[in-house]
Image: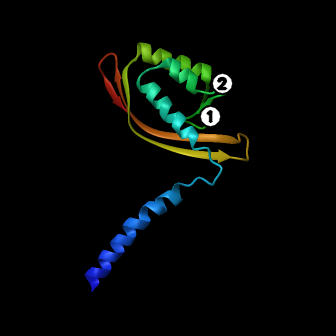
């Protein structure tokens, strides 16, 4: 009897799990998750050192923040920085793990749509030295 109940529970779980997943993924928060796709395309551009794609993907009013609270960079400086390191310093850049989180801030000093990205990178320098971040 107990085995039969366990089998039925497994069937119910197998049927309900995809439905619960779809419900959990439904976006009714007003958060623009399309921005995550842009970040993922940007990561691909970084890995391939495609400065033109990086330039096209960043908004003209782009501001990058971090790693510390007061650090920020605009589009022009970010592209110039990546161009410099990709041509002169990095042989390759590989994102080994990445997590994205989209948020919409409606109040405060900087309201807007944001994507936070936490990544681990494997960078191979032109002098042959590697670094994991």
What residue is at 56 percent from the left and 21 percent from the top? 55
Q: Are marks 1 and 2 in contact (CB under 8 Å)?
A: no
As helix, strand or loop, the secondary structure at mark 1 comes to loop
Say few, some or many: other residues with alpha carbon within 10 Å of mark 2 (under 14 / 14 to 19 / 20 or more). Answer: few
Q: What is the residue that sits farthest to the bottom in this orientation?
A: 1
Pick the residue in front: 74 or 41: 41
Reply above or below: 117 against 77. below
Q: Can residue 22 be seen in this snapshot? A: yes
Q: Can residue 67 be seen in this snapshot? A: no
Residue 74 location, x and y as percent?
Answer: 62, 25
Residue 2 location, x and y as percent?
Answer: 28, 84
Reply above or below: 29 against 63. below
Residue 115 location, x and y as percent?
Answer: 57, 40
Say few, some or many: other residues with alpha carbon within 10 Å of mark 1 (under 14 / 14 to 19 / 20 or more). Answer: few
Q: Tell me the residue that label 1 is attached to.
A: 70
Q: Tell me the residue that label 2 is attached to.
A: 60
What residue is at 64 percent from the left and 41 percent from the top? 113
- The quadrant of the image that shows the C terminus is top left
- The quadrant of the image that shows the N terminus is bottom left
What residue is at 43 percent from the left and 66 percent from the top? 16
Pick the residue in front: 105 or 6: 6
Would you say 97 lies left or right of 59 here? Answer: left
Would you say 19 lies left or right of 13 here? Answer: right
Q: Nearer the viewer, mark 1 or mark 2?
A: 2
User: How far is disc 1 from disc 2 in space, using C-alphas?
Assistant: 21 Å
């Amino acid at each position: 009897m107990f085995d039969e109940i366990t089998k039925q529970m497994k069937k119910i779980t197998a049927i309900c799990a995809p439905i619960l997943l779809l419900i959990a993924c439904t976006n009714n928060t007003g958060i623009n998750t399309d921005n995550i796709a842009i970040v993922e395309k940007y990561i691909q551009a970084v890995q391939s050192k495609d400065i033109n794609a990086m330039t096209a993907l960043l908004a003209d009013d782009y501001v990058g923040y971090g790693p510390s609270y007061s650090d920020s960079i605009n589009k022009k400086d970010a592209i110039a920085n990546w161009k410099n390191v990709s041509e002169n310093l990095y042989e390759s850049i590989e994102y080994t793990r990445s997590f994205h989180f989209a948020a919409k801030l409606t109040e405060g000093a900087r309201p807007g749509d944001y994507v936070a990205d936490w990544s681990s990178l494997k960078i191979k320098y032109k002098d042959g030295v590697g670094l994991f971040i």
